Amino acid sequence: VFIIASWLLNFRRLKNILFRETLEGRRGMIAYVRTQIKRAERIAIIIWCRWQVTPATWQVKHIRWYLNHSIRNLAVSTRNDHWRTIESLISRQGKLADWLPYLKGPWLRRDGLSKPIINTGRPKNLLFPSS
């Protein structure tokens, strides 16, 4: 019970940091950010049930397991939404550049294809950009 309570406390701290820094000076994003946070909580709980690790101690294997096994039966666009939430979380922790080569898969694109993404046009905006 103590482990679960400490895990919830750590996740709430992470959630508060993400929520506060994202909404600074932005008004129309509140519902979107709340949806992302609810999704991040569900992702964290599923990873916790399998691996007993908090979001602060996630490794690439935890994220890859979640993306390969836990969301494989969801619609392609929903898998992409989960990927964007995970991308935001690990970007906020400063791990995105190191982990991205190991996290390639069909969840990267809305069409569900594993083809490499060609960076053309305007750069995308992450929900929680690393500062």
Image (spheres, rainbow, N blue to C red):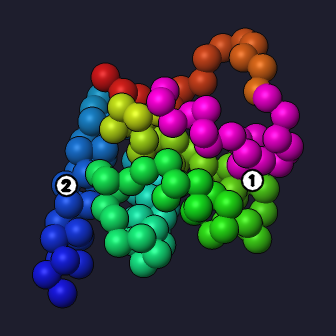
Q: Which residue is mark 2?
A: 13
Spot occupied by residue 4 in the image (x, y as percentages of width and height): 23, 78
Query: Which comes sooner in the sequence, label 1 or label 2?
Result: 2
Task: Report the Cα–Cα distance between label 1 and label 2.
Answer: 29 Å
For the residue pair 98 and 7, the one nearer the viewer reads as 98
Q: Which residue is mark 1?
A: 77
Secondary structure beneath dot 1 equals helix
Image quadrant in which you'd find residue 24: top left
Name the residue located 30 percent from the left edge and 46 percent from the top edge: 19
For the residue pair 56 and 31, the one nearer the viewer reads as 56
Spot occupied by residue 43 in the image (x, y as percentages of width and height): 48, 64
Q: Quadrant of the N terminus?
A: bottom left
Spot occupied by residue 26 in the image (x, y as percentages of width and height): 36, 32
Spot occupied by residue 86 in the image (x, y as percentages of width and height): 50, 49
Q: What is the span of residues highlighted in magenta in the rendered image?
A: 97-116
Name the residue located 78 percent from the left edge and 20 percent from the top edge: 118
